[in-house]
Amino acid sequence: MSTIQRYTAQERSNHWVVAIAFVLAGLSGLALFHPAFFFLTHLFGGGPWTRILHPFLGAVLFLSFMGMAARFWRYNRITPADRQWMARIKDVLCNRDQGLPEVGKYNAGQKYLFWLLVVCIPVLLVSGIVIWQPWFAPYFPVGLLRIAVVLHALAAWIVILAIIVHVYAAIWVKGSIRAMLRGTVSEAWARHHHRAWYRDVTGK
Amino acid sequence: MALQSLDIKARSATTTQPPAARDPLHVAKLIDISKCIGCKACQVACMEWNDLRDEVGTNAGIYDNPRDLTDQSWTVMRYSEVEVQQGRLEWLIRKDGCMHCEDPGCLKACPAPGAIVQYVNGIVDFHEEHCIGCGYCITGCPFNVPRISKKDSKAYKCTLCSDRVAVGREPACVKTCPTGAIVFGSKRDMIEHAEGRIADLKARGYANAGLYNPEGVGGTHVMYVLQHADQPELYAGLPKDPHISPLVGLWKGITKPLMSLGIGLAVFAGFFHYVTAGPKEVEDEKVD
Ligand code: HEM
Ligand code: SF4
């Protein structure tokens, strides 16, 4: 099987730092989101530890995500072909891939996920800092705290849903996970899913 | 249940019904501002009974001292000099502290099971051993009362001397007040007592005298008799129509269960997509 390099070791490491920080920040945040999830505090050493650790995990996520965003920014510009691809999302979901518009390094779904995270993660950072006890919250008026908790919970919910879709897509589209684990994809995979990128990197 | 007098009616971050077999007496503290002389005996009694020692601060040039509620000062006197009628100075002294709302915003906001409880008798109490120090109670409170300790990152406020009330005693501030400005008893008796006081104040020219027992939070278990009940803001910014902020309602209301359901549904949708539509495989090459 001939393979193509899709991610460098640095890109892969960056992605997995983001992923680990996201899962930890997400689980520790969810623990306080609704009583149904409070049992998750046990994963972090109890309620106070969960409260203490969560913002630091979030900060690690923010920093590592910004690094990744800078690396992948230019591949995520939305083009007219992306809109055509999105118009056929039903076919994509039903695995009817014949005649889809050519896709570059990322398809429209991946790009929208990227921009959603680019918006939501800074919102999480800013709103998270406003409600961060005991360091920052005492400096903000209660009206702002109330806005920040709502924004934080909403943005967290949106990114958690988006990441569930992202993880599922990686499981669904066979051959994708090795791209991020090993860095390579098969030529067939690249030709099928990202033809424009395939032509770009292989010159074929 | 340890003490019948402390049967629990509501518990933070708990979605099932606490034991509800009994309905003990509903209590209330009534603070008659027209009788208060600002001696701060109640502040001292609170410190003594609850064994609290605030840091010695600096004088801000007014009588308010300490300047604000803290984790060590669960009640403070707030002094307002106002002229409701031109040329007629009034010194309004309000004993500030937890109002023990019937619908407590702190309890609604708190994510830690059992860190905030409301007894059937109406007292809202913080159980610091369950507190995680997130400060959500501060965002929930319409009266700006809870304070987080710098020492242990736990939230503190007036307990209405739940430990004394549990054994049939009045709160320490009530016991000590030299003018009888603070009284304690069943909520119904306190409302009745207030009515007498209000009639007296009206007879003495305070046409707008009235009871502060705000409906927006379902009534409170600490109530005030105000000389100017039409303008509670005169009393160091006592809110006219306190209620749990709609933002807190949005944050802690039906949205949370719905959002949680949405997360669960997303996972299920993925699983069922996989077992129906199936994975996306590239035919001509075996890849993983
Ligand atoms: C970017 C940096 C972040 C900071 C500074 C931050 C900070 C905070 C703080 C201070 C809290 C209150 C509880 C506590 O003190 O631990 C909180 C709650 C929460 N956080 Fe974050 N966070 C960040 C990122 C995230 C991320 C990435 C997620 C989701 C994946 C998330 C999900 C949540 C959730 C669900 C809650 C509970 C909200 C609620 O009670 O409604 N946070 N966060
Ligand atoms: S600081 Fe403590 S009492 Fe206040 S909301 Fe958080 S866990 Fe509950």
Image: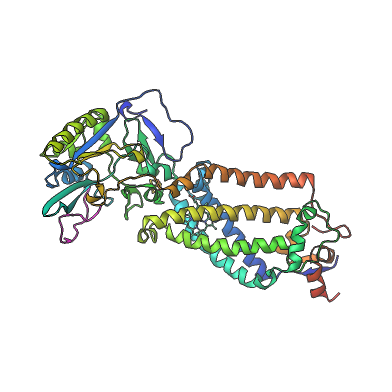
* Image coloring type: rainbow
Q: Position of residue B115 (x, y in %)?
A: 39, 42
Of the 4 image quadrants, the one containing the N terminus of chain A is bottom right
Please give the name of the residue rendered at 82% of the width and 59% of the height, measured from the top-left corner.
Answer: B287
Please give the name of the residue rendered at 55% of the width and 51% of the height, measured from the top-left corner.
Answer: A27
Relative depth, front residue between A67 and A138: A138
Q: Position of residue B40 (x, y in %)?
A: 14, 47
Write down the quadrant of residue A144 in the picture: bottom left
Residue A173 lies within the magenta run: no
Relative depth, front residue between B92 and A62: B92
Q: Taking A60 as reference, is B219 left or right?
A: left
Please give the name of the residue rendered at 16% of the width and 49% of the height, measured from the top-left corner.
Answer: B92
**Res A181 visible:** no
Q: State whether residue B26 is above or below residue B42.
A: above
Give the magenta range.
B52-68
Residue lying at the far right of the rendered structure:
B284
Of the 4 image quadrants, the one containing the C terminus of chain A is bottom right
Q: Position of residue B270 (x, y in %)?
A: 71, 48
Relative depth, front residue between B195 and A31: B195
Q: State whether residue A48 is above or below residue A71.
A: above
